[in-house]
């Protein structure tokens, strides 16, 4: 499955979760529900995936965790914050570089309309 197809399914799941729950809950709640929705679609999703850093050829476990890794191709970083800011974008870009994923979604569930809380992030071209 291509990254763009996976992305469409991720967004479908996000809209379903936001429609059911609305804003105001913890990030971990949205993560569990997104995991459930994506699994229901028969799509491979992993949660809290450890992401090592390679420094001078040495693998270092630094505590970085990807919220959702879908089909080992698309990263989803979930937030439940007042507003997305530059540090959130920097976080997903770093995760994408370290994992070599080319597509990512930064999704803030703490918004009235989910559309305003979604940022699609592309690293290079695919």
Image (cartoon, grey):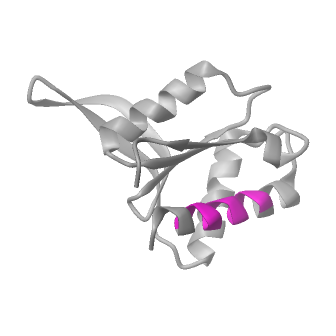
The part of the image, by quadrant, that contains residue 113 is top right
How many numbered marks appear?
A: 0
Observer-nearest of 36 and 101? 101
Q: Quadrant of the N terminus?
A: bottom left
Magenta stretch encompasses residue 69: no
Q: Residue furthest left?
A: 57
Residue depicted at x 54% and y 79%: 42
Using the image, determine if residue 38 lies above or below residue 62. below
The extreme right residue here reads 112
User: What x and y, as percent, mark residue 55?
Assistant: 16, 24
> Is residue 14 shown in magenta?
yes
For the residue pair 69 and 97, the one nearer the viewer reads as 97
Image location of residue 21, percent across then percent down: 85, 54
Q: Residue at x 58, y 60 (%)?
A: 7
Quadrant position of the C terminus in the picture: bottom left
The relative height of residue 123 versus residue 42 in the rendered view (above or below) is: above
x and y percent of residue 50 in the render? 35, 42
Residue farthest along the front direction in this orientation: 125
> Which of the 4 image quarters holds residue 77?
top right
Q: Residue at x 76, y 26 (%)?
A: 83
Q: Most prominent secondary structure in the magenta stretch?
A: helix
- The residue stretch that appears in magenta: 6-15
Q: Position of residue 26 (x, y in %)?
A: 73, 39
**Is 58 on the left or on the right of 92, as rendered?**
left
């Amino acid at each position: 499955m291509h990254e763009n197809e996976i992305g469409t399914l991720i967004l479908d799941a996000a809209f379903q979760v936001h429609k059911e729950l609305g804003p105001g809950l913890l990030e971990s709640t949205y993560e569990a529900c997104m995991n459930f929705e994506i699994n229901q679609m028969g799509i491979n999703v992993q949660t809290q995936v450890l992401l090592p850093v390679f420094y001078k050829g040495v693998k270092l476990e630094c505590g970085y965790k990807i919220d959702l890794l879908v089909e080992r191709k698309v990263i989803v970083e979930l937030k439940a914050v007042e507003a997305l800011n530059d540090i959130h974008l920097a976080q997903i870009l770093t995760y994408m570089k370290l994992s070599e994923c080319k597509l990512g979604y930064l999704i803030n569930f703490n918004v009235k309309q989910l559309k305003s809380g979604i940022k699609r992030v592309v690293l290079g071209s695919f």
